[in-house]
Image (cartoon, grey):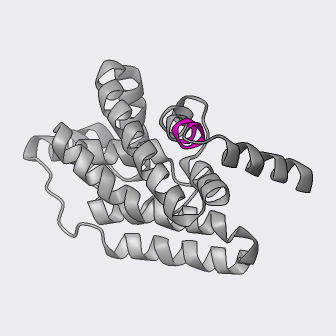
């Protein structure tokens, strides 16, 4: 394992500007090979260090957000699946706030694209979506890149406590008011009867 790690570091160091470019492109297209973005951010911290890893991961996730925004309108099946998943997990009449999405992105078991879809529903203009996506990616990238740089120093109990704290904060930051249209309210009641 030591030899493989040393070889990988030598390849990255000798890659020049190709290594960061390949890392950013991998970040953009990792969603098609079902690799969680947290794993890629951790790898960025391991390979490049904290500051360059954060910068490359932010650029890569911004590119991934642009690709998500362009493709979500083109693939209605995916949009429908994400909408059903959001209704089942979040609720039919609930929307996540931007601060909730930022906190929930830190929890590794929550689907990253589902959270992007929640942002898309909240801010469906390109400029609004990109701003919200960039802001919610900042804490995610900083945490996982620094985590990747110092991965050997953490204990499992600390991670469990941290995830519990994040879930409680996400609950406390929820929207307190829900607006339900008159027609939708009575449609759901008649469907239950």
123 is higher (above) or lower (below) than 162: above
Residue 39: give x, y in percent of width and height.
Answer: 63, 51
Residue 77: give x, y in percent of width and height.
Answer: 40, 21
152 is higher (above) or lower (below) than 140: below
Q: Which residues are magenta?
A: 18-23
The C terminus lies in which quarter of the figure?
Answer: top left
Q: How many marks?
A: 0
In the picture, measured across the screen, residue 105 lies left or right of residue 118, that is: right
In the image shown, does 136 or 145 lie closer to the viewer? 145
* Magenta segment main secondary structure: helix
Residue 136: give x, y in percent of width and height.
Answer: 35, 58
Which of the 4 image quarters holds residue 109? Answer: bottom right
147 is higher (above) or lower (below) than 136: below
Residue 138: give x, y in percent of width and height.
Answer: 39, 61
In the picture, measured across the screen, residue 87 lies left or right of residue 185, that is: right
Which of the 4 image quarters holds residue 147? Answer: bottom right
In the picture, measured across the screen, residue 183 lies left or right of residue 146, that is: left
Q: Residue at x 24, y 45 (%)?
A: 129
Q: Is residue 193 visible?
A: no
Residue 20 within the segment the image draws in magenta: yes
Residue 116 within the segment the image draws in magenta: no
């Amino acid at each position: 394992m030591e030899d493989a790690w040393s070889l990988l570091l030598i390849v990255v160091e000798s890659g020049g500007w190709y290594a960061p470019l390949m890392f950013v492109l991998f970040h953009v297209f990792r969603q098609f090979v079902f690799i969680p973005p947290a794993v890629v951010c951790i790898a960025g911290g391991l390979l490049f260090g904290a500051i360059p890893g954060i910068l490359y991961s932010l650029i890569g996730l911004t590119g991934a957000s642009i690709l998500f925004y362009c493709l979500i309108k083109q693939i209605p099946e995916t949009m429908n699946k994400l909408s059903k998943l959001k209704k089942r997990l979040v609720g039919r009449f609930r929307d996540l706030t931007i601060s909730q999405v930022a906190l929930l992105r830190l929890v590794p078991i929550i689907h990253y694209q589902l959270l992007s879809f929640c942002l898309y529903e909240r801010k469906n203009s390109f400029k609004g979506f990109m701003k919200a996506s960039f802001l919610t990616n900042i804490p995610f990238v900083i945490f996982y890149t620094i985590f990747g740089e110092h991965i050997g120093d953490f204990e499992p109990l600390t991670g469990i406590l941290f995830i519990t704290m994040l879930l409680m904060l996400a609950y406390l930051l929820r929207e307190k008011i829900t607006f339900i249209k008159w027609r939708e309210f009575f449609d759901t009641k008649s469907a239950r009867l």
